[in-house]
Amino acid sequence: MIDFSAVPRIMVATQPVDFRKGMNGLFVLVASTLEADPYCGDIFVFRAKRGDRVRCLYWGGSGMILATKWLENGSFTFPPIKDGPMIAEVYLIEQQIRGEGAEVRYHARQSRSAAIMRSLKARLLELKADISTQSALAKAINYTLKHWTGLTAFLDDGTIEVDSNVVERSMKSVALTRKNSMFVGNARGGETFAILASLINTALCRARHKALYADRRTMPSASSGRNGKPCVPSQFGGSPLFGTRHSSHAQRVFRNSRSRSLGRNRSALARSYGFSFASADSFSSRCA
């Protein structure tokens, strides 16, 4: 049973999806099309091409959950989706220009994304005039229009991202650490907890950005590298599809390790997450 009170958001696909994809296919669809983290706790809802089934993809904390619901004839009719500007088009443009310089990103956004955002705003104003002011949709539209300046800030600056999802996911780890720190019994335990937290996060950085970590000997603290270009994993052979998210291999190893004893999997964790803390030169050659 899904605890909806703990779910941050429910995201519904606006177009039918081929259900032959299965869990892995829907996982990749979330990461590539929505550019969202499937492990963030949101519920992602998809509908079949014939409209007779819906599927929910959800990370339950200990594993990925895929639930399927068959719909009886006439029990539910999917509303028609009007062709028009969709925010997904903006994210598609961002995917195409990821890794480019600030000037290239700026000109692409001005020539392509700006028109989409203007059309989207016009569509929101049109919907707002046709629906009840007390409806949930009207409140969502008003919230979007209220923050429109911040929402479109990426159009005038090629150095910033289209959204703040990366920052929000970083805040989640801070909040979880604050909650877990409540169970530290004394100062010595707090020091041990801090060491382990630093160790694990360093290992996760290596798992996410192996080539980038090896090239710089450390994780970048800014959005630009030594040559002034943006520091993105795709420049170092990483997949631009997942960006800063966990690789599927790292996630799989982590989940498997949780269900086994630490002693049996210590060597596997060292190979996958870099617990050996080899020197930068040996690590660079190992990731080449």
Image: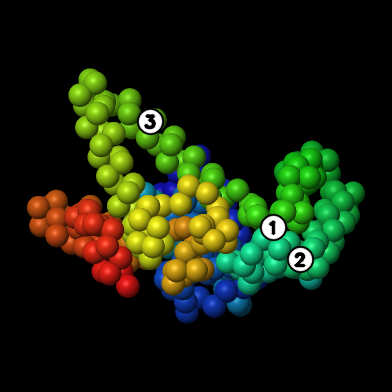
* Element assignment for label 3: helix
Above or below for 3 versus 28: above
Is residue 54 shown above or below 221?
below
Image location of residue 168, percent across then percent down:
54, 44
Q: Is residue 89 left or right of residue 184?
A: right
Can the viewer see residue 184? yes
Residue 119 screen position, x and y as percent: 84, 61
Query: Does residue 263 appear to the left or right of 67 in the view shown?
Result: left
Residue denoted by label 3: 179
Quadrant of the image occupied by residue 135:
top right
Q: Secondary structure at mark 2?
A: helix
Earlier in the chain: of badge 1 and badge 2, it is: 2
In the image, which is nearer the foreground, mark 2 or mark 3? 2
Q: Pointer 2: residues within 10 angstroms few (<14), some, or many (20+)? A: some
Which one is closest to the eye, mark 1 or mark 3? 1
| Labels 2 and 3: the sequence-earlier one | 2
Q: Which residue is mark 2?
A: 107
Label 2, label 3: how far apart the Cα atoms are:
43 Å
Q: Residue at (79%, 63%) from the top-left corner?
A: 110
Residue at 30%, 52% (x, y): give it.
203
Which amino acid lies under the numbered mark 3 shown in the image of this protein?
Answer: Lys
Can residue 81 be seen by looking at this rendering?
no
Label number found at residue 158: 1
Report the front residue among 210 and 18: 210
Residue 53: x and y, percent? 54, 69
Q: Mark 1, residues whose alpha carbon is within 10 Å: few (<14), some, or many (≥20)?
A: many
Q: Quadrant of residue 188?
A: top left
Q: Is residue 121 above or below residue 108?
A: above
Q: Residue furthest front?
A: 227
Say which quadrant the C terminus sits in.
Answer: bottom left
